[in-house]
Amino acid sequence: IQMRRKRNMPALPENLKYSVVLRIRQSERMSNEDVHSHPIVELQEKIQPEVMELVKQQRLQRLCEGTCFRKTSSRRRQDRFWCCRLSANHKVLHYGDLEEANQGAVSYESLQEKIQVSDIKAVITGKDCPHVKEKGALRQNKETQELAFSIVYDSDEYLNFIAPNKHEYCVWIDGLNILLGKELTSDLTKSDVEILLSMEMKLRLLDLENIKIPEAPPPIPKEPSDYNFVYDCN
């Protein structure tokens, strides 16, 4: 009866075969055991600046593509929109009103207003933004507060934003911090860096699969007594 049951058992799916499961377990074991080893930590520290630079380039590219924002209004229905774009040389923010939200790519020429990046003094977020303080509806809406930010430029001038979602909020805050020479601290940056760093580490360690990585490098051998064995190319 047992033999008959075994014969009637369906074949295992490809992702559950022993060889596949073994390879996955070996990879997980390598990740768990070697992630804190000194060579792995050194490699991560070397790669991380490259990954961070890639994230910064992506953020600035997104600002150059531009984003459509809703205009803040005391009315319940907010049907007016505006767009803001960073110039290709990262020196000017162009912005202006839009007739509708989704009208495709907005040209720099159609955005009549602009702010020099060198004139930006600071970026304010959340309930400290002037448009959140002034408008009671925004002040009472916690979800909107989390998407609000303002650019302070010249002396007391403000450009006020309400991001369409949390992702765009993080992209703009990161991008503005890059322009101001500040660190990136958003949750989106942390997530992107972790994902990219993990992928890059796996690619670089691909040839070392199933090889035990030593905690310390091997000792450097002593110098030979002479170098007569060196071939003179001349």
Image (spheres, rainbow, N blue to C red):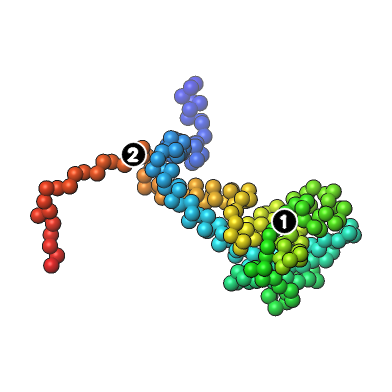
User: Is the C terminus in the top left, top right, bottom left or bottom right quadrant?
Assistant: bottom left
Q: Which mark is residue 216?
A: 2
Residue 128 is situated, as x and y percent measured from the top left of the image, at 77, 53
Q: Amino acid at mark 1?
A: Ile
- Quadrant of residue 233 within the rendered picture: bottom left
**Circle 1 residues within 10 Å: few <14, some 14–19, many ≥20:** some
Residue 170 seen by the camera? yes
Q: Is residue 230 left or right of residue 58?
A: left
Residue 114 is situated, as x and y percent measured from the top left of the image, at 71, 73
Residue at the limit of the structure toward the front, as seen here: 155
Which residue corresponds to the image point at 28% horizontal and 41% vertical from the top-left? 218
Q: Amino acid at mark 2?
A: Ala
Q: Is residue 78 left or right of residue 162?
A: right
Mark 2 element type? loop
Disc nearest the viewer among 2 and 1: 1
For disc 1, the marked residue is 124
Which residue corresponds to the image point at 60% horizontal and 72% vertical from the top-left? 88
Lower sequence index among marks 2 and 1: 1
Distance in Å between CA atoms under marks 2 and 1: 47 Å
Which residue corresponds to the image point at 58% horizontal and 60% vertical from the top-left? 181
